[in-house]
Amino acid sequence: MSFLTQGQIAYEICLEIAYICDCILKNSHFVAIILIYDFYRRHSMSVSYNRLWKLLIDKKMSQSELRKEAGIAPNTMTKMRRDEAVNLAILGRICDVLDCDFGDIMEHKCMNDDKGEV
């Protein structure tokens, strides 16, 4: 795995954006849409709450107990089980209940540029 500097990443992003703009100017809107989607897919971020589930096991607390103590809606817990982003205020309430910090309950991962995988 090779790591790029911030300057190299910025340069690559600028090249991709310039190519997308060129497609739009040439009325290749369909191609531009595909390029934008691909760009978003490769550069989007993913959230993992595996640290939260492990912390709950360590503290011998169930997900439903956490939900009740932190005042979290059931659909928010479902989002978290699916590793979807949730409101920062909710994460703050979870941290208050568990007496921890954001990094103790979640991890923010960048998508792999080659395969679109985390």
Image (cartoon, rainbow, N blue to C red):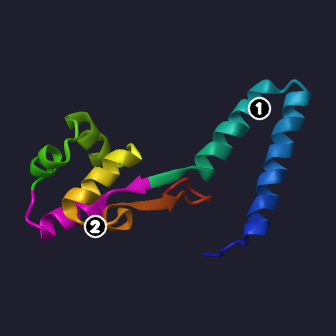
| The stretch drawn in magenta includes residue 8 | no
Determine whether, in the image, residue 82 is placed left or right of residue 21: left
Q: Residue 112 bears which disc, if any?
A: none
What residue sits 80% from the left and 45% below the top?
17
Q: Nearer the viewer, residue 17 or 27?
A: 17
Residue 82 in sight from this viewpoint: no
Q: Quadrant of residue 26?
A: top right
Considering only vertical position in the picture, is 67 above or below 23?
Answer: below
Q: Secondary structure at mark 1?
A: helix
| Residue located at (33% from left, 53% from top) | 92
Look at the image and give the residue range highlighted in magenta: 47-61
Residue 78 location in percent, x, y? 25, 40
Q: Residue 57: within the magenta?
A: yes
Q: Which residue is mark 2?
A: 100
> Which numbered mark, 2 or 1, is in the foreground of this view?
2
Q: Specify the quadrant that holds the N terminus.
A: bottom right
Can residue 16 be seen by looking at this rendering? yes
Q: On the rendered structure, is 37 left or right of 54? A: right
Q: Which mark is residue 31?
A: 1
Front residue of 18/113: it is: 18
